[in-house]
Amino acid sequence: MKSQMDLESYFYSIALWEKQDVIIITDRGMMDNFAYCTPQVRQNVLDETGWTIQGITNKRYDAVFH
């Protein structure tokens, strides 16, 4: 998840260089990773990184399409 977060942040930083609007599309969002974890592993990830579910779901992405 840290690698995914870093990669998404990298693409975002590249998009900031553009003078026009940019859409960044990813195949999976951060929350998708938690579907493959136990609740304890999920909590460990959140504790180690300082991330919150609220921050990942409501602040990281402008839109989510299913």
Image (cartoon, helix red, strand yellow):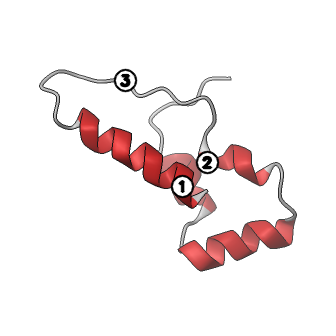
Q: Position of residue 20 (x, y in %)?
A: 17, 21
- The quadrant of the rendering that contains the N terminus is bottom right
Residue visible at 44% across and 44% down in the picture: 8
Q: Looking at the rendered structure, which numbered label has been put on residue 23?
A: 3
Q: Position of residue 66 (x, y in %)?
A: 68, 23
Q: Amino acid at mark 1?
A: Ser
Mark 1 to mark 3 CA distance (whole Å): 20 Å
Mark 3 to mark 2 CA distance (whole Å): 17 Å
Residue on which disc 2 sits = 30
- In-front residue for pair 55/38: 38
Residue on which disc 1 sits = 3
Q: Amino acid at mark 3?
A: Ile
Left or right position of 4 against 37: left
- 34 is higher (above) or lower (below) than 64: below
Q: Looking at the rendered structure, which numbered label has been put on residue 24?
A: none
The reply to whether the C-beta atoms of the residues labelled 3 and 2 are less than 8 Å apart is no
Q: Secondary structure at mark 1?
A: helix
Residue visible at 12% across and 25% down in the picture: 19
Residue visible at 79% across and 69% down in the picture: 41
Q: Secondary structure at mark 2?
A: helix
Mark earlier in primary sequence (2, 1): 1
